[in-house]
Image (spheres, rainbow, N blue to C red):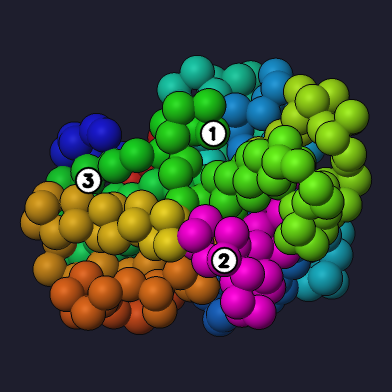
Amino acid sequence: MMARPLKQRAAMTSDLILAVDGGGSGCRARLVNGTGVLAEVTGGPANLMAGDGRAPFEAVLAVARDALATAGKAPAALADCRAVLGLAGATPDARSRFFAFAPPFAETCIVSDGYAALLGAFGGEDGGIVIQGTGAAAAVLVEGRLTEIGGWGFALDDFGSGADIGRRALRAALRAHDEPGAPPPFAAAVLKAAGASPQTVMDWAQGAAPRDFAQLAPRVFDAAEHGTPEAEAILARAAEETARLVRLCAAHGAERVAVLGSVGRRIAPMLHADTAALLVEPAGDAMNGAVIALRQGLGHCA
């Protein structure tokens, strides 16, 4: 968890703004100008901490080119874009690696995906968010002060995330395999979804990224909807983590909290009434928030 006052930079003007929301499973880009939205596209994973940083850099370039093409603009228009990137894994070292690849934009600004989502959820006003997608984190903005909660990565944290749900499902499947007799259908289905068997799952896990574990999460939700006890227990544990993050947002001063992300939106209805009473619907998304960050002069820019 980190709390810090936000730094601002001098305002600039430019017609084209490329807003990107990127995480471990994919990214979205929105191209806007003074008249409105010109294009919106999706692309591959863009977590800044992936490898040496080349893959997320290429993912951002790919969605940027796709957005320009969708809007009917030439590739050379990259140089006219002010790009603001709300990306997972936006640590100082990861940002430096990204900038070292020399982004071809007129200006490039990076904020965390959580901060972009927070700004978008409340239009830059005070509030808190819990994000559960491939990973999990929370953030609070109160009187201009940003507090980031969790988000320490898959090896150390991400409890309640899609990756965590998938990992717990695999663990449950392997524990079931250790029992005498045939494993239950849920265990077999999870292993099949991973494309692994009890004999090969260790090799699979060694090479798997968080997004690979997260791809198993929909199987868990489906099984829970059909009353599978193992799946229900996994989601109950995820809901406990969601509630914990919501409570932490409140403890840091948030009077309203939005639960976001592909997993978070499915977990939120499972929360107890006392926690759910704090929840509100977001006013906008992370790409809205990225544009707000750019226009307010926030972020790390080059």
Q: Is residue 276 above or below residue 261?
A: below
Residue drawn at point x = 26 percent, y = 68 percent: 257
C-alpha gap between disc 2 and disc 3: 39 Å
Q: Position of residue 255 (x, y in %)?
A: 12, 68
**Seen from this angle, which residue lies furthest front?**
180
Amino acid type, mark 3: Leu
Foreground label between 2 and 3: 2
Side of 267 where 169 appears, left or right: right
C-alpha gap between disc 2 and disc 1: 25 Å
> Does label 3 or label 1 sit earlier along the sequence?
3
Side of 130 where 153 appears, left or right: right
- Per the image, the residue denoted by label 1 is 154
Determine which quarter of the picture holds residue 247.
bottom left
Q: Secondary structure at mark 3?
A: strand
Q: Position of residue 266 (x, y in %)?
A: 51, 73
- Residue 201 appearing in the image: yes
Q: Position of residue 173 (x, y in %)?
A: 71, 46
- Per the image, the residue denoted by label 3 is 146
Q: Which numbered marker is on residue 196?
A: none
Where are the magenta residues, as a range?
212-235
Question: Neighbour class for label 1 at 10 Å: few (<14), some, many (≥20)?
Answer: some
C-alpha gap between disc 3 and disc 1: 23 Å
- Per the image, the residue denoted by label 2 is 229
Q: Secondary structure at mark 1?
A: loop
Question: Neighbour class for label 2 at 10 Å: few (<14), some, many (≥20)?
Answer: few
Residue drawn at point x = 88 percent, y = 40 percent: 196
Q: Is residue 206 above or below residue 119?
A: above
Determine which quarter of the picture holds residue 184.
bottom right
Residue drawn at point x = 52 percent, y = 56 percent: 234
Amino acid type, mark 2: Pro
Q: Secondary structure at mark 2?
A: helix
